[in-house]
Image (cartoon, rainbow, N blue to C red):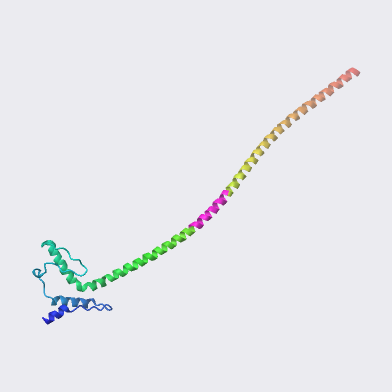
Amino acid sequence: MGDENNNKNEKIKIDYENVDVEDIMDQIKKKKASQPRISESELPAQPSYTSTQAPAPLQPEGPSGKKAKIKNVMLKLFKPITPIIKFLVLPVHQELKDTIQNLYAANQRIDLLERHVDENFNQIRQKLDEVNQATISRLEELNRVREYTQLIHNLSHNIVVELTKLKIEQENLKLKTRIMEKDFEFLGKREKTLESKVFG
């Protein structure tokens, strides 16, 4: 009886600096083997609650009552290995912490990139405004040059028309002068013939 009481009161020793899972499992097996088996008839009518659970209302005997009893037995059995479960969950917690840190660093990088993009966008917009203003001034100059070119073209066309008219008038005047020269020659011959007849 004394050995059984010692085994019952004996706690599982865990060295958290150097965790040996096999040693812990051996201690659990020894403790479980030393405990007498509990039959369903010896189980208490009301489940015993841990400090973290609130007392539940009384449940009638049946399938739900059996589930509650089994749940309480499982909680008692798993209570000694809760440090192992916490130790097993620790890498997941560390991975989650690393993931959160990586996400925070990524968010900071994204914010920095957004600031750079905004600054570059403002610079590009200023350059585009300057280019647009220069393009507008060049277009205005081109429009003026086009208007001047059109005016010069119209002027040259009018000059050509006027020169053509002057050329035609010059040809007409030449013809008239030739006709008049022939008339003068004819009149001179006629005058000479009349003088020869009168004075001859």
Q: Viewer-proximal residue, 9 or 186? A: 9
In the image, residue 157 above or below residue 12: above
Q: Which is the main secondary structure of the residues drawn in magenta?
A: helix
Q: Viewer-proximal residue, 184 or 134? A: 134
Residue 43, image quadrant: bottom left
Quick one: quadrant of the C terminus?
A: top right
Picture residue at 76% right of the left edge, 27% below the top: 176
Quick one: quadrant of the N terminus?
A: bottom left
Picture residue at 62% right of the left edge, 42% below the top: 147
Picture residue at 58% right of the left edge, 49% below the top: 137
Instruction: Report whether residue 166 is seen.
Output: yes
Q: Which residue is outermost to the right?
A: 199
- Asked if the magenta segment contains residue 72, the reply would be no
Residue 180 is situated, as x and y percent measured from the top left of the image, at 79, 26
Count of number-bearing discs: 0
Q: Give the range drawn in magenta.
A: 121-136
Residue 117 is situated, as x and y percent measured from the top left of the image, at 46, 59
Taking the image as shown, residue 167 lies to the left or right of residue 32, namely right
Q: Which residue is outermost to the bottom?
A: 2
Residue 50 is situated, as x and y percent measured from the top left of the image, at 19, 70
Taking the image as shown, residue 92 lies to the left or right of residue 170, namely left
